[in-house]
Amino acid sequence: MEKLSSSNPVPGVCELRQRIGIIKENIHTAALAGGFDPAAVRLMAVTKTVPAGTINAAIEAGIDLIGENREQSLSGKYDEIRRDGVEIHFIGHLQRNKAARVVKMVDCVQSLDSIALAKELDKQAAAIGKQLQVLVEVNIGQDPNKSGVHPDAAREFVDALRELPSLSVRGLMTILPLECTTLQMEKYFSQIHALYVDIRAQNRDNVCMDCLSMGMSGDYKLAVKHGATMVRLGTVLFR
Ligand SMILES: *Cc1c(COP(=O)(O)O)cnc(C)c1O
């Protein structure tokens, strides 16, 4: 993890701008090290523990993509967030009974892990005339404590989503098991990248794979080196 200069518990715009600059440099270096295009990597600010005022400071500092993992946490801040030009993605486990509220607030659900949830999201998106982007969450480490579809089931899962007209499949998302060695992390990142490339190469209708969302504060450089096109960062930005 980065050593950050400030001990201030609530970083202001200047401090956030500085941190974003360092993170972007790290992303740049890591992408080049892996032979990937640095410009293709998006930075998400994970704002789940962050009050609306700090989210708005991050937006002022250049953040244009935020991620939340609970419906209630997002609902509570939603009206206060300066959302103009800012995308909001849902990144947590989503219960079907909260789908309607989430669909209204977000551009993308990254944590799609069941057909039942997909059908509910499609229905709720259709009801408000929205085209909802989704990422398929893949449990690449086959961790029993994590949600996500089994890697071997991902292709079939993407196929099934093609029948849901209000959903647009944009790619894959993953969270690695806790306490992986660097070697294991590299193995998982490479495996999901291969899966992503493979599904994308099949050029399915209604599927436009351009997002591989992986990497958090502790492992984002490694994730980018292995082909992430989006990293999701909370701690290194806000702590
Ligand atoms: C909290 C969270 C993150 C960010 O984690 P940090 O280690 O704080 O960067 C990323 N992805 C998901 C799904 C999360 O819930």
Image (tube, helix red, strand yellow):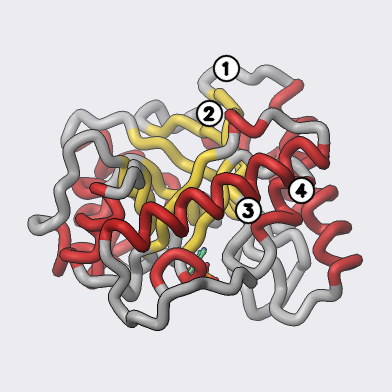
Q: Nearer the viewer, residue 47 or 58?
A: 58
Residue corresponding to mark 2: 162
Residue corresponding to mark 4: 192
Residue corresponding to mark 3: 214
- Label 2 CB sits under 8 Å from any ligand 1 atom: no
Label 1 packing within 10 angstroms: few (<14), some (14-19), many (20+): few
Percent coordinates x, y for residue 197 in the rendering: 76, 31
Residue type, numbered disc 1? Asp
Instruction: Report if the CB atoms under discs 1 and 2 are less than 8 Å apart.
Output: yes
Please report whichever mark, 3 or 2, sits nearer to the chain's N-terminal start.
2
Spatial CA span between label 4 and label 3? 9 Å
Q: Nearer the viewer, mark 4 or mark 2?
A: 4
Q: Secondary structure at mark 4?
A: helix
Please report whichever mark, 4 or 2, sits nearer to the chain's N-terminal start.
2
Please report whichever mark, 4 or 3, sits nearer to the chain's N-terminal start.
4
Quadrant in the rendering for residue 79 = bottom left
Determine the residue positioned at 42% across, 76% down: 6
Residue type, numbered disc 3? Met
Determine the residue positioned at 69% across, 40% down: 156
Q: Nearer the viewer, residue 210 or 157?
A: 210
Q: Nearer the viewer, mark 4 or mark 3?
A: 3
Instruction: Report if the CB atoms under discs 4 and 3 are less than 8 Å apart.
Output: yes
Determine the residue positioned at 64% across, 80% down: 145
Residue corresponding to mark 1: 205
